[in-house]
Image (tube, grey):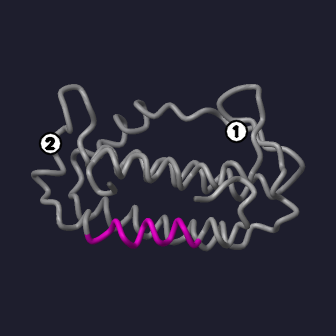
Amino acid sequence: MTSEQTPFPAIAAGLLQTVESAVPKLLSMSDADASRPRAPGKWTPKQVIGHLIDSASNNHQRFVRAQQGAELVFPPYEQDHWVSCQHYADRTWHDLVTLWHAYNRHLVHVVSHIPEEKRHVACVIESTEPVTLGFLADDYGRHLRHHLGQIGILT
């Protein structure tokens, strides 16, 4: 397991391993299965992968912007709004998985090149309590694995 003190290239390597192992399992799911909610009132796998695309997008901005200065203040992410207004349920499963895969491969590249001296940049996102860029990079992979587990891709 990684932590916020794990070197960025190692965090990136773990992320790459997770993403590459998930893709064949994701692509083996039919569009119909990806369109069914896990339980009443829950997101479909399409919406979960859409949420993970949003997470990639938000974290991409955080990873890059946090390297620009001594502190990052970033707006919170309103996940239900983002998933709803982008109509992920209307997209093909293959398109969503392909976008998610490509975006995460890019984030692997970005994270692997974060300079160690930027590890402790303070990032304020969801509250007034800052976290470090190292925490954000590590937490991104944890968040991704959590949601892949929810849709049965990781056990």
Q: Residue at x 89, y 48 (%)?
A: 70
Real-space Cα distance between discs 2 and 1? 33 Å
> Of 137 and 4, which appears nearest the observer?
4
Q: Is residue 33 left or right of residue 85?
A: left
Q: Residues within 10 Å of mark 1 (few under 14, many from 20)?
A: some
Q: Quadrant of residue 25?
A: bottom left
- Quadrant of image for the N terminus: bottom right
Residue 16 lies, in percent from the top left, at 50, 71
Q: Residue at x 10, y 52 (%)?
A: 32
- The residue wearing badge 1 is 74
Residue 40 lies, in percent from the top left, at 18, 27
- Quadrant of image for the C terminus: bottom left
> Of 3 and 34, which appears nearest the observer?
3
Please name the predominant secondary structure of the magenta segment in the image.
Answer: helix
Q: Label 2's element?
A: loop
In magenta, the rendered stretch is 13-24
The tally of labels here is: 2
Q: Is residue 16 left or right of residue 123?
A: left
Q: Residue at x 57, y 70 (%)?
A: 108
- Label ID, residue 120: none
Residue 103 lies, in percent from the top left, at 48, 65
- Label ID, residue 36: 2
Q: Is residue 134 magenta?
A: no
